[in-house]
Image: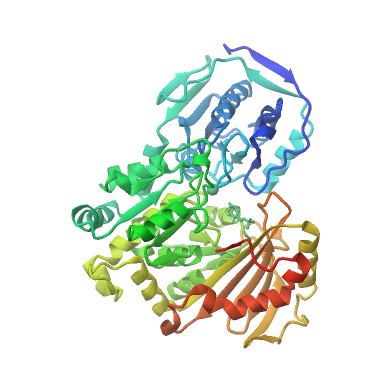
Amino acid sequence: MGASIKTVNTTPYTDQKPGTSGLRKRVKVFKQPHYTENFVQAIFDVTAPANISAAPGSTSLVVGGDGRYYMKDAIQIIIRIGVANGITRFIIGKDGILSTPAGSNLIRRFNISRGGILLTASHNPGGPDKDFGIKYNAGNGGPAPESVTDKIYARSKELTEYKYADIPEVDLSKVGTHKVTEDAVVEIVDSVETYVELLKSIFDFDLIRNFLKTNSVDTGKFKVLFDGLNGVTGPYGKRLFVDEFGLDSNSVDQAVPLPDFGGGHPDPNLTYADKLVARVNKEDIDFGAASDGDGDRNMVLSKDWFVTPSDSVAVIADYADYIPYFKTGGGLKGLARSMPTSTAIDRVANAKGLECFEVPTGWKFFGNLMDAGRLSICGEESFGTGSDHIREKDGLWAVVAWLNVIAAANDEKVKKELNLKSSNASGIVSVKDIMARHFSLYGRNYFTRYDYEEVESEPANAMVKLLRDSIGPNSPLVGKSFNGFTIKSVDDFEYTDPIDGSVTKNQGIRIIFADSSRIIFRLSGTGSQGATIRIYIEKYEPDAEKSQLETQDALKDLVNAALTISKITEFTGRSEPTVIT
Ligand code: G6P
Ligand code: ZN
């Protein structure tokens, strides 16, 4: 074998249970003696070819991450332990950088049946006192299912030793193939290149390029700004916006991945992407966008409109005919959303005669539907949008999808076809105009989310119990009216996967009104302190004349109903939510 393989005795840790998106802990926790090594060994044990399959690619592994503090150390550990566990080929992003979608793409593109290890804690802050994460993705490119992560957890609790190869540190900065032992190579790849190639095969780059050349580069009428939030997408954004679309380099902000994301919270929403929001308003930006630390979330806005994630996915689905990828292979398959996401996309599915799935919160629930060829485009209210091109949500995919939509909407032929009108002196059909047409066609699903963070667990659970006690056909709430809204049904969302029949219960209390408005209560599955209560409020407004109200005004009565029904202030002592999105 060449390198000497050492066996190290270790004591298991009992807290290595992966959450929704891998094992996420403070950096300090990962730096405890053998902590990272143990978890990595557990992954290799559970996914060893003998335990899953010896398919081609079972001794290869994709590795990379969002550039956060401790990532490079973790990569060296993975190489050493991987070599000792029979991995012969590592595909690693240059400097370790690999956005989550790019990682999913590499696994699929190179047929790596063993999958990959992604080093990220997504949108959580990074740095020596902040978070790190290790996530295992399976051979389909998607996050490992619970059946696998449960096994990794079980294995981590019984480990008594791990193996590592005594090899020198690998230089991650040099693209190319590096031999690390007689039998093992490390391939450092420019993941930006492969990812951009992927997007090129999906979207109409010529259409986008021409639109931006005329309206942004030559005349400055359409201003574009992408904010990488100092996360992983900066280099990808630069390659796309500057090299491919020909925009000025200052159209990409905070584009250098930093180990601590510049001290910020790399989450694209109106609260944390405050620099982008301020610049969009101040500089009259026509198209502003951001992605999170590891590149799977996205936000889209303009100087006069904020596109909610629920509306965003509905619009992209509505314009699928103008996106080349969805024209191939028999056209659009089904659409889908997570349960709390507004039902705007359902209306598009209905109009197009497509299946529309409602799954529990969490991207992993879309994977089976995609693998079975029943799902093309899907999204979540939590700023996740994507399609079956990979098995993760994809921030830049959504951003480029919007550019494709805007470019198409400004094509003279399409403009006529869709009866699109510009409300701007420049004559350009703007984000706001696209939304206005959407609402006039489908009605508007006003949507807001109230988050009550770090509530004590006991009162939060008591509140959920109160709500749960009133579910079912005999619910005392059914038939009651609140400010003119009459309750039609109350249930606790349960999902039966149509592909494998697996059942997921207790996914959130749904109060559905006669006019199809909804109030949903759910406890977050990603909070790290106490409990986070989320209330999702949605009202359907069919009248186009009433589609331009302020969201909070439009939803006031339903918000009050939600507060009354849940007695949230009584239970938690909170009179205001921590965050409203
Ligand atoms: C992660 C997952 C998403 C999910 C979100 C929900 O970001 O990748 O798919 O929507 O968590 O978080 P919550 O805190 O509402 O459980
Ligand atoms: Zn993320």
**Image quadrant for the C terminus?**
bottom right
Give the image location of residue 172, x and y in percent.
47, 25
Of 213 and 398, nearer the camera is: 213
Q: What is the x, y in percent for residue 112?
A: 52, 36
Q: Residue at x 42, y 38 (%)?
A: 256
User: Where 482 sits versus 411, above or below?
Assistant: below
Closer-to-camera residue (159/561): 561
Q: Is residue 568 left or right of residue 381?
A: right
Residue 48 placement, left or right of 374: right
| Quarter of the render that holds ligand 1 | bottom right
Q: Nearer the viewer, residue 331 or 313?
A: 313
* Occupied quadrant, residue 132: top right
Q: Position of residue 168 (x, y in %)?
A: 54, 15
Q: Nearer the viewer, residue 201 or 19?
A: 19
> In terms of image quadrants, where is residue 548?
bottom left
Q: Is 310 left, or right, of 3 in this rendering?
A: left
Residue appearing at x 45%, y 38% in the figure: 257
Camera sees residue 328: no
Determine whether 511 is above or below 140 in the image: below
